[in-house]
Amino acid sequence: QVEEAERNRGAAMAAPSQQKTSLANKWHRDFQKALELDGWGQVEEAKSGYETLVRSLNTESESKPALQWSYKEMNAVKNLMTCMRLRCMVIKRDDDEGISAENMKAMSSVFENLFKRDKKFPLDLSTVSPEDLREATGMAAQVRALEANQGDSDSDDEVVENITDAVAPKKPASTPSSVGKSKAAAIGLRRQESRRNEADQAAATAQEMADPSVEDAPPRGHIPPPVASPKRTVKAVYITIEKIGLKDFDTYVDPRVSVYIVSGGRIVEGVQDTKISSDKAENHIVFNEAIKLKQSLDMLLPGGAVFFEFKHFKKDKNRISTRCWCFLEREDLAPGAHVLELYKKPADLKRKNIHLHTVKELYLHVNVEYVQEEVM
């Protein structure tokens, strides 16, 4: 009986793997058919094949078995869908700006290795315009909805300020940070806000129950208040800047780390700076400060990346200077600890001209955390 139970358990574990392999093989065959049509110049037929395949991938990614997919497997499927949608957009526009049929050939190996082993996505989506990426990922509708919700409440000056905030760095605080305080403060603020909301809701409910003057129906001629937009849950991304390793770590004045998001070769989210740190230990400058990205996880575009620049104050030139930089790609932005290589300045937003800052085993250490939050 024990042996039979073990065999049944092994068969149950093998079944999902076999299903995924069968699914990946079918997708690969369908993709090859569409790719051949694309290569022969039968672009409309190829477009229909890509669209059918995207629907199949989308249906499976939203089904219950998809819960057994790894983070990288899910990202690979999403990137495949994005690239096929981008190719369909190029075919529909009948132009050469964007993903070409030749580019699509590189995705064949991704389909072939899907669910077998992790493989770096072969296409660089950072060169695609953010507008096309939003359309291909379905984010354009979310952006338009956010703009519509703002309505006329923002003045022209406020709108301009919101736009320019994406490239205007914030002035860092001048007080030194202490180990662990910033992260604890960030978590504490979220808990306090949650408790306040629960208390307010409970108080409002109690008042309604205790007040006999409240009637079920509004009086005649009463204009009801506007219905609030329903809230939705998003995954907020918190990145804790733990420490950075530098051979001359004890020589820097007012060290800090700047964090921002890059897509399509340009900054798409305003720069955020850590507090200046005076904590140093074993060739490292310690920050232990959590930075919340302004964009939620679902709004981060494929091919984008979170950039980190280590900066310090130069007394002889009386200015803040970048010493080195690194990045974490959207596809690698998984929860947990990350150790990032340091590169020579200046920061290359297109990630084409990259050279190591040092050959020593010195890195930027960060930790990524997802937090479910409600937004309007």
Image (cartoon, rainbow, N blue to C red):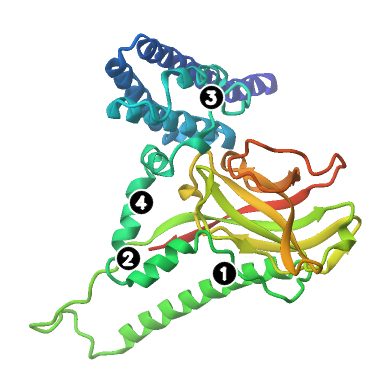
Question: Which image quarter holds the N terminus?
Answer: top right
Label 4 packing within 10 angstroms: few (<14), some (14-19), many (20+): few
- Report the mark closest to the observer, 4 or 3: 4
* Mark toward the start of the polypeptide (2 vs 1): 2
- Judging by the rendered image, the residue that carries numbered circle 4 is 142
- Identify the residue under disc 3: 16
Residue type at the position of mark 2? Gln
Q: Earlier in the sequence, mark 4 or mark 3?
A: 3
Q: Is there a contact, CB below 8 Å, between mark 2 and mark 4? A: no
Q: Amino acid at mark 1?
A: Arg
Q: Position of residue 112 (x, y in %)?
A: 54, 16
Secondary structure under badge 4? helix
Amino acid type of the residue tagged 4 in the rendering: Gln
Marker disc for residue 125: none
The Cα atoms of the two marked residues, 1 and 4, are separated by: 25 Å
Residue 162: image quadrant is: bottom left
Which quarter of the rendering shows the C terminus? bottom left
User: Is 61 situated left or right of 171 in this image?
Assistant: left
- Residue denoted by label 1: 190
Q: Please tell me in which quadrant of the rendered image residue 220 appears.
A: bottom left
Q: Earlier in the sequence, mark 2 or mark 4?
A: 4
Task: Check the image and report above or below for 219 versus 341.
Answer: below
For the point 38% across and 39% down, the residue is 132
Q: Residue at 37%, 23% (x, y): give it.
A: 53
Q: Residue furthest front?
A: 317
Disc on the earlier residue, 1 or 3: 3
Q: Position of residue 348 (x, y in %)?
A: 63, 44
Q: Residues within 10 Å of mark 1 (few under 14, many from 20)?
A: few
Using the numbered discs, state the Cα–Cα distance from disc 1 to disc 3 in whole angstroms: 38 Å
